[in-house]
Image (tube, rainbow, N blue to C red):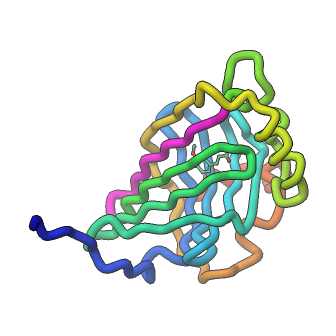
Amino acid sequence: MVASFRPQQDFSDFLGTHFIYTYANGWRYEWYARNEGQCDYRIHHGLVGGRWATRQAIGLVRLSEDLQFQANWHEPTGTCVSLFFDLTRRRLQGTAFFPQWIAGDGQHPERAICYQNDFIEDMRRFRDEGPAYPYVTFSEFATITYMKNVGTDNNEVISMAPGQLPDGYTDRVS
Ligand code: FER
């Protein structure tokens, strides 16, 4: 039998970290590792810029003994997201599978632009009404421009809509 490899699943260097990053195509996101099972995020630029959510359920994986972590989750909209964070190199690779109703030509990304927590039932309805297929795959590398540990379960990190933030908020570096 071939020995299987599974790095120790120690998330202590990742949990509580707040990130701002920009994808190669210009999309800018903010993401917070709230705790082992949940993330908060805000979308500043991109297809669904203005969208944000807190306490989204995620699965976390530590990919190696280095500071490499992966977060995987499924949104109430039907979108599936997988983010690979390389903390040492301050890089990220993100893949999202968007249903047609969000990312298809002539469809309705604007319906997903909200504070999702207040519209979970609507998002599930849009998801179920579709169309879902064919899914639209987004896969890009991003550069992390801000990375700071602010502790876990901090409600001050992602607490208002992207449009309510002061000018230049996403340009801060750390
Ligand atoms: C990301 C963080 C969150 C990302 C996507 C999301 C594409 C969420 C998307 C959605 O729910 O629509 O880095 O990369």
* Residue 135 percent coordinates (x, y): 59, 30
Q: Which residues are magenta?
A: 88-99
Q: Main secondary structure of the magenta part?
A: strand
Residue 45 is drawn in which quadrant? top right
As drawn, is 95 to the left or to the right of 134? left
State the residue at coordinates (82%, 34%).
129
Q: Is residue 167 visible?
A: no
- Along the line of sight, the residue nearer the viewer: 174 or 88: 88
State the residue at coordinates (53%, 32%).
137
Counting every numbered tag in the picture gives 0
* Residue 102 percent coordinates (x, y): 72, 32
Residue 55 is drawn in which quadrant? bottom right
Instruction: Determine the residue located farthest toward the front in the rendered image.
Output: 1
As drawn, is 69 to the left or to the right of 154? left
State the residue at coordinates (76%, 16%).
106
* Residue 174 percent coordinates (x, y): 51, 65
* Residue 58 percent coordinates (x, y): 58, 64
- Along the line of sight, the residue nearer the viewer: 127 or 148: 127
As drawn, is 138 to the left or to the right of 120? left
Query: Measured along the vertical axis of the image, is residue 27 above or below residue 166?
Result: above
- Along the line of sight, the residue nearer the viewer: 34 or 149: 34
Instruction: Determine the residue located farthest toward the left in the rendered image.
Output: 1
Query: Measured along the vertical axis of the image, is residue 172 above or below residue 4?
Result: above
Q: Is residue 63 visible?
A: yes
Residue 89 among magenta residues: yes
